[in-house]
Amino acid sequence: MQPKPNRTVTVAAKSRILAAVLLGVALPALAAAACSDDADSSEESLGVVRVADGEAIRIRTLLAGPGERSSAYSNSRIVRLAVEHFGPIHGFDVHVGEGHDDYCAPDGGRGAAETILADRSVVGVIGTACSVAAVEAAPLLSGAGMVLISPTNTSPALTSDLAGNRAEHNVAGYYRTAHNDLFQGRAVALFLREDRGLGAVAVIHTGDVYTGGLAEAFIDAFEELGGEVTGSLVVNREATDLVPALTALASGSPQALFLPVSQTVGEAIVQQAPGVAGMDDVLLIAGDGLIDDEFMAQPETEGLFFSGPQVHFGNNRNESTGLTAAEVRAAYEEFYGTPPDSAFWGHAYDATTLLLEAIQAAADEQDGTLVVDRAKVRAHLDGVDGYAGLIGEISCDPFGDCGRAVVEILEHLDAGDVGAGRSNSVYEYAP
């Protein structure tokens, strides 16, 4: 994809639709629904969406609703900000609508996808928040010809094994700007084995497509590096008594414990591990799912390490809006009064502009009506190569992996200063 001239956007500027876009309020011109026309349904086509004069192009978020899981809601806000910064497409506004919550669960992903599908004029969706929700949501949205672009899904099961083999849950029309956890697993293994010089580790996870996939990626990489995995346990994601599991793992005398787990299990581990014999001096390192302000604000999380996406974007600039990461962050703070609290906020911004670029490339105006070809939206995303985003240069492989393979290890030292913990990178893996 060749970069196009940057749009003229100033952070302080507030257009006539800013409040409506960011708050999800429909403009008067959106009162009538855009018309989806699937009559053109040959094998080569996924149909088209027709947007009449005075109506708006419709996209949706499948991340979180107000008050639900703050980091996912922060990404929903970033999507709205990116839409505002990108501006109209061929003179047509873009409407995000009410946010949908995947509840980080398969049922949540399926239910939200079914709600979105009730409006056949939706072109694309930014989501899901969690990989487990994408397993159910992606096939439904794909079957309707829509695209789903996630800023936060990391499970290898959604794309590929990075060796050219399609994964179990990969479907056409699915893309992500987040990294593949095969990279994250290796990053954690390298950090513990080579940077910290540890030879024996234990693993605990909750067995779903995200935590189980990340645990497996880590175990394979750690053993390849000559390390020993002394124990690996699967627990229920709602478990609160982790003493038996921790006691069992401690019997193997691990030097570190890798815990890609739910927040409920993570809270129990950091509270209970110090009281388990053999666990008091064990290094604890969590997956990116626990990089959350509420979790990190707990005193027991001090000293915990986290693996997760790149958090330092330097002077990277999004080629669609012309804004740097610092300018986008400042715009978010100006409007919402707080910085974004998601580790993947840059990925969410880039996912949105990629979708909008694809819609722009796939749309033609015909007698005052904007016609968006669904197959061309996918074709454009399939061809993304060298796109300049906030997270860096983005290219999409044949299975929808578009994110950069940069993983950082954070050391969280002060529960009273979560922001410092989020930015305290002590190790970077960038193959």
Image: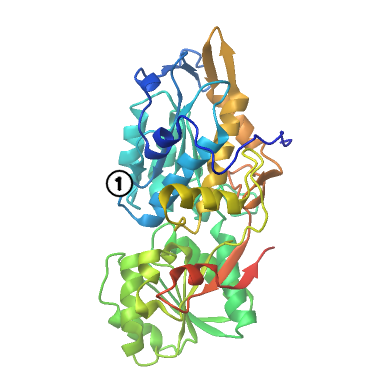
Q: Split into 4 quadrants, where in the image is the N terminus?
A: top right
Which residue corresponds to the image point at 72% horizontal and 34% vertical from the top-left? 5
- Mark 1 burial class by Cα count in 10 Å: few <14, some 14-19, many 20+: some
Which one is in front, 315 or 72?
A: 315
Which one is in front, 70 or 380?
A: 70
Q: Is residue 30 left or right of residue 347?
A: left
Q: Is residue 363 above or below residue 71?
A: above
For the rendered model, the colour scheme is rainbow
Task: Locate residue 127: give its quadrant.
Answer: top left
Q: Is residue 279 left or right of residue 425?
A: left
- Residue 312 placement (x, y as % from top left): 61, 62
- Residue 314 placement (x, y as % from top left): 66, 59
Seen from this angle, which residue lies furthest right?
Answer: 2
Q: Split into 4 quadrants, where in the image is the C terminus?
A: bottom right
Which residue corresponds to the image point at 30% horizontal and 78% vertical from the top-left? 242
Task: Locate residue 388: give its quadrant.
Answer: top right
- Residue 179 placement (x, y as % from top left): 57, 55
Residue 220 shows up from this direction: no
- Residue 132 placement (x, y as % from top left): 39, 52
The amino acid type, in three-letter code, at marker 1 is Asp
Which residue corresponds to the image point at 55% horizontal and 31% vertical from the top-left? 87
Q: Which residue is mark 1?
A: 107
Q: Is residue 164 above or below residue 360?
A: below
Residue 73 shows up from this direction: yes
* SS for dot 1: helix
Seen from this angle, which residue lies furthest top?
Answer: 367
Q: Is residue 65 left or right of residue 191?
A: left
Which residue corresponds to the image point at 48% horizontal and 61% vertical from the top-left? 213
